[in-house]
Structures are given as structure tokens and as C-alpha cells.
Amino acid sequence: MTIDADQLLAALRWRYATKRFDPTKKIPAPIWDALEESLVLTPSSFGLQPWKFLVVMDPNVRANLAPESWNQPQVTEASHYVVLTTRTDLTATDIDAWMNRMMEVQGSSEQAVAPLKGMIEGFVQAMAPEARHAWNIRQTYIALGQLMASAALLGIDACPMEGISMAGYDHVLGLEASGYATTVACALGYRAADDKYAGIAKGRFDRSRVVTRL
Ligand SMILES: Cc1cc2nc3c(=O)[nH]c(=O)nc-3n(C[C@H](O)[C@H](O)[C@H](O)COP(=O)(O)O)c2cc1C
């Protein structure tokens, strides 16, 4: 299944960082299900998937996150609100969990995954713990990108949210000492009719400045 290039670009040009969502409009369950699956399907280095995606349904929790988000209205007005959290380290247990899953879904033996396991362990052990967290965070941003592009293709508005207190979120969400920490969030839903940002021209550098063909 493919869409054509014009359809892709139309969706990417239609999307914008939505400031005001229509709080009365909710994303239908099958569409939301697809968006959650787009998170699950996100690729990551070595396939390690060092994340958990928290879909905050409880309005009280969203209200508590608002002051930790510069009171940006998206937190409470959007249909859905996802907090993308990242594993703060990578240990043998994480790598084992992934190897076991590979054996389960690909039917491979312990012997078959051993070389990959050894390579990942060597790679991960050579990093300082902070570097492992930073590496994991880079993977989480891929999920954010995949979620936003998927939303645009489905006609769902979104706003990536980095204007948040990560520590404040961790506290509200009870993540402290969980091995996961807040990285970024994403509000999703339907733009309000009067969101003035919807009509603003896309501010992008010329392609010649950002793309070089060698
Ligand atoms: C990682 C990231 C974090 C962002 N955080 C916020 C935010 O907290 N609040 C907000 O209103 N916009 C936020 N934005 C939106 C950007 O300002 C916006 O994407 C950029 O200006 C380009 O505009 P466009 O997305 O409408 O094309 C964020 C964007 C990204 C990619």
C-alpha cells in the first residue's frame, strides 16, 4: 500500500504545531488505536525500544500536568495526551527482555541471537550511564516523529510539547525511581476553529540551505 507523493506532502503541509484544540472533539477509538500502534512500530537502534508511552486519559492528571507545562492549553484541551518516557539506563535485563521477545516472535534460538546480544552488550557497556540515557532519548524522539507524521496522514492535529518540566512530569506521573523519565509529550486531537496558528505560512528554510546532494 502506498500513497502518492502529493498526498504525503499535502498531509505534511497541513500539519502544524496546534496551540488550541477543540476540547469537544475526540479522536475515534479505531484512529487512536492506529496512532498507538504507530508508537509501538517505531524503529529503534538495535531494536531495543527503550521507552514507555503514557496516554494520559485522566482529566485530573492532565490538570496537574498543566502547571508543569507553562499552562499551555494543549495539555487539557487536546483529545489525547501522550507523555513519551525513556528508560534512564540500559542493563542486561533490558537486553535480555528484547532477546527473549525476538526469540518469541522470530522463532530464533538462544544460539542464533547470541552474536547480536554480545554486540549490543559490548556497545552498551562501553557507554557511561548518562550516555545510555541520552542515547535512549534520541530513540524516543523517533517515536515522536513517527507519531506526528502518522497523525498528519490520518488528519489528526498534534502538538509536540517540550515546553514542560520533565522533573515535574516525573513527579506527577510517579515516575521517580521507576527507571523511566519524561522526555517529551504530544497533544493530539482536532484544531479549534479559531486557532490562529493554523493559517500561518510554514516557516522553513529553503531546501538548498538544509539539503545538499553530494
Ligand atoms: C521537540 C519539539 C518540542 C516542541 N515544544 C512545543 C511546545 O512546548 N509548545 C508549543 O506550542 N510548540 C512546541 N513545538 C512546536 C514548534 O515550535 C513547531 O513545530 C515549529 O515552530 C515549526 O512549526 P510547525 O510545527 O507548525 O510547522 C515543539 C516542537 C518540537 C519538534
Image: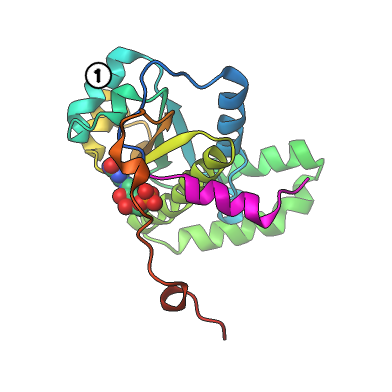
Position of residue 107 in the picture relative to residue 102 (left or right): right
Secondary structure under tag 1 reads helix
Task: Estimate how packed mark 1 is, as few (under 14), some (14 to 19) or many (20 or more) residues with alpha carbons within 10 Å.
Answer: few
Q: Position of residue 202 (x, y in %)?
A: 38, 56
Residue 133 visible in this rendered orientation of the protein: no
Q: In terms of depth relative to the viewer, which is nearer, 69 or 45?
A: 69
Numbered range of the magenta stretch? 1-16
Amino acid under label 1? Ala
Q: In terms of depth relative to the viewer, which is nearer, 116 or 74?
A: 74
Name the residue beneath numbered marker 1. Answer: 63
Q: In terms of depth relative to the viewer, which is nearer, 202 or 35?
A: 202
Residue 110 vs 63, above or below: the answer is below
Q: Quadrant of residue 132?
A: bottom left
Position of residue 118 in the picture relative to residue 109 (left or right): left
Q: Position of residue 167 (x, y in %)?
A: 22, 37
Queried on whether the Cβ of the residue with tag 1 lies below 8 angstroms from ligand 1, the answer reads no
What quarter of the picture does the C terminus occupy? bottom right
Residue 143 vs 46, above or below: the answer is above
| The stretch drawn in magenta includes residue 7 | yes
Residue drawn at x 70%, y 59% as measured from the top left:
115
